[in-house]
Image: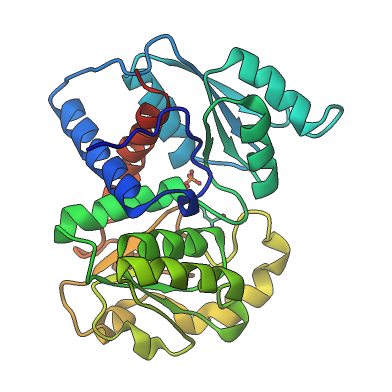
Amino acid sequence: MDIDLKGRSFLTLKDFSEKEINYLLTLASKLKQDKKECVYNYNLLNKNVALIFEKPSTRTRAAFAVAVADEGGHSEFLNSNDIQLGHKETIEDTARVLGRMFDGIEFRGFSQRNLEILAEYSKVPVWNGLTDEDHPTQVLADLLTIKEHFHKLKGIKFVYIGDGRNNVANALMIGASKVGMDFYVCAPKSLFPDEKLVAQCMEYAKESGAKIEISDSTDIVIGADVIYTDVWVSMGEEAKSKDRLELLKPYQVNEALMEKTGNKNAIFMHCLPAVRGNEVTHEVIESENSVVFDEAENRLHTIKAVMVATLGK
Ligand code: CP
Ligand code: NVA
């Protein structure tokens, strides 16, 4: 493929074409196979990567750290409480300093704007490990998991149910509309996705052939191939917990909802961490149709692909 992503940042899938996304998925599959066969490519040999976390993480942090190590590089975890990041010095200054020392920077935090500033001022590839608005590395893992399972993305009926305006829902709508997967949101009206983002994704969908539909009725799950949910209260929104739990109760993924799809081969997906008993029941997450741990593993291979493509030799 004539695709070169060297030097690019990975801030949102909005910046990537269908071809580029598919290139990253193909690379991730290859790197996954290589690891299974103990083939080491050392694509990040002598590269130093900073991992900045303003919010907690298990999967993203572990995936970045292991991916860098697998490729022969070094990663340094920088807890935002321990560094100056917008306190005492500007984000721009921190970015310029880190860019002089590190070859690439992962950032998980609140503000998408701060992520963009990091990329602009550090002048090295910056990778989005989750912001309030977006979670693009998660979506690559999700797309890879769906491709492994169904051997295609186009024509798949993907239903996201729950908080339809959080970072994961946004990122999935962007990713699905770019690659031509039919994307349905099932959420209470007050948690429908942002209209501007929907309009932007409709434009991507025109090009890729994807459908986008949004409804507050769970009837939208009928015929689904994939049922996906995420936590009802995202990091940083803890104050809204009580209201959210009430509002989202009818949108729990339980056995009745999975049956409502009418498709016994429909898979269950969740980015994790999951709050069992809230957005999903124990029975569904432990069922044969649940692929949540394949998704979690694929965080490693897809994050590795992003770093190798943008920074590798
Ligand atoms: N899915 C995900 O991003 O998990 P972590 O918050 O554990 O990184
Ligand atoms: N929407 C969740 C995703 C966690 C991976 C959050 O932001 O907390």
Residue 242 appears at what percent x and percent y? 67, 73
In this view, 91 is above or below 110: above
In this view, 240 is above or below 149: below
Report the number of numbered marks: 0
Looking at the image, in which quadrant does ligand 2 appear?
bottom right
User: Residue most toward the front?
Assistant: 2
Along the viewing direction, whichever of 295 and 311 lies nearer the viewer: 311
User: Residue most toward the right?
Assistant: 88
In the visual, does 13 lie left or right of 248? left
Residue 140 appears at what percent x and percent y? 36, 49
Residue 309 appears at what percent x and percent y? 36, 31
Among the 4 quarters of the image, the one containing residue 196? bottom right
In the visual, does 304 lie left or right of 231? left
Q: Residue at x 54, y 78 (%)?
A: 248
Among the 4 quarters of the image, the one containing residue 92? top right
**Taking the image as drawn, is residue 174 in sight?**
yes
**Taking the image as drawn, is residue 83 in sight?**
no
Q: Residue at x 46, y 80 (%)?
A: 251
In the visual, does 256 lie left or right of 108? left
Residue 51 appears at what percent x and percent y? 55, 28
The quadrant in which the C terminus is found is top left
Along the viewing direction, whichever of 183 and 281 lies nearer the viewer: 183
In the visual, does 83 lie left or right of 162? right
In this view, 51 is above or below 194: above
Q: Residue at x 28, y 78 (%)?
A: 258
